[in-house]
Image (cartoon, coloured by chain):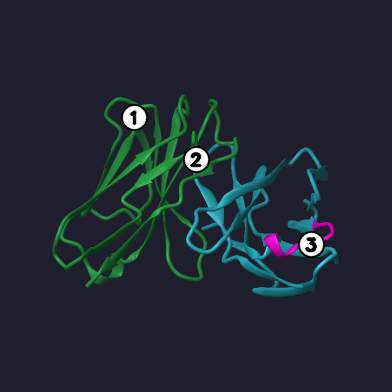
């Protein structure tokens, strides 16, 4: 089946620095992607999404980049704060189906 | 709070017992999903409802699992004859619209522990 993988399982950054979390996907037919943040003991929290007809999308302090040529997705967090410490997941979907496929996740730790 | 609500938050039971979880989606969200998440892994899709109709089930959903959404609002997930391998976080999510390309909003899950 389809798979979503993350390059790095853990990431540590200094407070105030920018963070980049990467995600590789294998299904070229996927056309919708979501980044989620999950804190301990809580459910995944929607951060930002992007459709395959876009290369970049910006939110508040976050930017998602999509490179369809190499099937790569990244989440950039500007001026990382301690509250950003969490596990981040990317999820992919084919609009012809109802299933979202999640990767294993990247644990982000922000060092004060 | 108008987010997705799940009950109970924690459930501890002995192997072989039946358990039932409830999910109340965001009001007016017609799409409802159940996922299972084990430690260190991302959520795995279990099943999906469009209003009251269960339209898709994962092969992960064995015969011991059953889900319902009788009135197209809240949903229940029942596990019969629980096994050790059923220990996990069970997450519910909901979304609006007619397609899957809409953000899913998750509840905080029910953590199931099988003794």
Q: Is residue B38 left or right of residue A68?
A: left
Indicate whether residue B19 is drawn in magenta: no
Bin the neighbour count of mark 2 within 10 Å (Cα to Cα): few under 14, some 14-19, many 20 and up.
many
The secondary element bearing badge 2 is classed as loop
Q: Are discs 1 and 3 less than 8 Å apart at CB?
A: no
Q: Are discs 3 and 2 less than 8 Å apart at CB?
A: no
Numbered mark located on residue A98 in the image: 2
The secondary element bearing badge 1 is classed as strand
Q: CA distance from mark 2 to mark 1?
A: 13 Å
Chain letter of the cyan region? A
Q: CA distance from mark 3 to mark 2?
A: 33 Å
Identify the image quadrant of the C terminus of chain A: bottom right
Bin the neighbour count of mark 3 within 10 Å (Cα to Cα): few under 14, some 14-19, many 20 and up.
many
Residue A55 location (% of width, % of height): 82, 45
The secondary element bearing badge 3 is classed as loop
Residue A91 location (% of width, % of height): 60, 52
Magenta-drawn segment:
A77-83
Q: Earlier in the sequence, mark 3 or mark 2?
A: 3
Q: Is the residue at mark 1 from the same chain as the one at mark 3?
A: no
Q: CA distance from mark 1 to mark 3?
A: 42 Å
- Most foreground residue, A106 or B11: B11
Q: Colour of chain B?
A: green
| Residue with the mark numbered 1 | B53
> At x 70% / y 60%, what residue is drawn?
A84
Residue B2 location (% of width, % of height): 49, 33
Above or below residue B77? Residue B95 is above
Residue B42 location (% of width, % of height): 52, 61
> At x 80% / y 68%, what residue is drawn?
A15
Identify the subunit bearing mark 3: A
Q: Is residue A2 left or right of residue B45?
A: right
Numbered mark located on residue A80 in the image: 3
- Most foreground residue, B37 or A53: B37
């Amino acid at each position: 089946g389809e798979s979503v993988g993350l390059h790095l399982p853990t990431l540590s950054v200094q407070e105030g620095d920018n963070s980049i979390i990467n995600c590789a996907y294998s299904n070229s037919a996927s056309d919708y992607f979501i980044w989620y943040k999950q804190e301990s003991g809580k459910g995944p929290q929607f951060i930002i999404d992007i459709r395959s007809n876009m290369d970049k999308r910006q939110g508040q302090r976050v930017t998602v980049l999509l490179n369809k040529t190499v099937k790569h997705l990244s989440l950039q967090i500007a001026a990382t704060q301690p509250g950003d410490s969490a596990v981040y997941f990317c999820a992919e979907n084919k609009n012809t189906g109802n299933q979202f496929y999640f990767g294993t996740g990247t644990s982000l730790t922000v060092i004060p | 709070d108008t987010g997705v609500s799940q009950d109970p938050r924690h459930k501890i039971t002995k192997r072989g017992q039946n358990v039932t979880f409830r999910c109340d989606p965001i009001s007016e969200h017609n799409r409802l999903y159940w996922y299972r998440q084990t430690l260190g892994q991302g959520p795995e899709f279990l099943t999906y409802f469009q209003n009251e109709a269960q339209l898709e089930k994962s092969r992960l959903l064995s015969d011991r699992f059953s889900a319902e959404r009788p009135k197209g609002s809240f949903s229940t997930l029942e596990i019969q004859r629980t096994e050790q391998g059923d220990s996990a976080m069970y997450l519910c999510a909901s979304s609006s619209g007619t397609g899957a390309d809409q953000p899913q909003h998750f509840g905080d899950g029910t953590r199931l522990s099988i003794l």
